[in-house]
Amino acid sequence: MNYNPKSLKAEEFISHEEIQETLAYAEANKHNEELIDQILEKAKLRKGLTHREASVLLDCDIEEKNQEIYKLAEQIKRISTETGLLCLRPFICPITVSTAACTVLITEKTNT
């Protein structure tokens, strides 16, 4: 089967190869400040991030950038919660997945 992230069939949108490539991409770019800044700027526009972009933010271990990620995730979560879009209408708020991923990152890092 070919990888198709928009498919409704699990065997088409879940791809072991894509997962491995995404993890490798994140590992290769977790210190790429220019790319991280570009991803953060895109996130600020609230137009959604790709799974690869979100994986770079999740893998980032640059403390200054992580603080920016936390701050932005908190802002997006607050705005989404206030407007009732978080979880209720994920099709209207495409950043929800990335917000959730960043929220998980925040939770994991603050609980360790």
Image (spheres, rainbow, N blue to C red):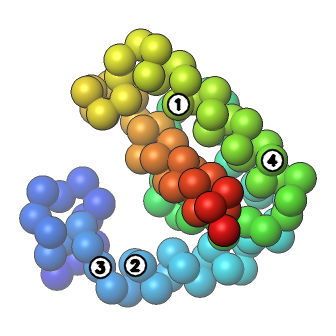
Number of marks in picture: 4
Tell me the residue that label 4 is attached to.
67
Decide: marks 1, 4 in contact (CB < 8 A)?
no
Q: Residue at x 47, y 37 (%)?
A: 95
Q: Quadrant of residue 29?
A: bottom right
Asked whether residue 57 is in view, the answer is no
Amino acid tagged 4: Gln
Against 63, is 98 above or below? above
* Local SS, label 3: loop
Residue 41's tag is none
Query: Picture coordinates of residue 50 (x, y %)?
Result: 49, 53
Circle 3 crowding by C-alpha within 10 Å: few under 14, some 14–19, many from 20 = some
Q: CA distance from mark 3 to mark 1?
A: 29 Å
Image quarter of the N terminus:
bottom left
Circle 4 crowding by C-alpha within 10 Å: few under 14, some 14–19, many from 20 = few
Of labels 1 and 4, earlier in sequence is 4
Decide: marks 3, 2 in contact (CB < 8 A)?
yes
Residue 7 left/right relative to 98: left
Q: CA distance from mark 2 to mark 1?
A: 28 Å
Tell me the residue that label 2 is attached to.
18
Query: Picture coordinates of residue 47 (x, y %)?
Result: 51, 32
Q: Residue at x 41, y 79 (%)?
A: 19
Tell me the residue that label 1 is attached to.
77
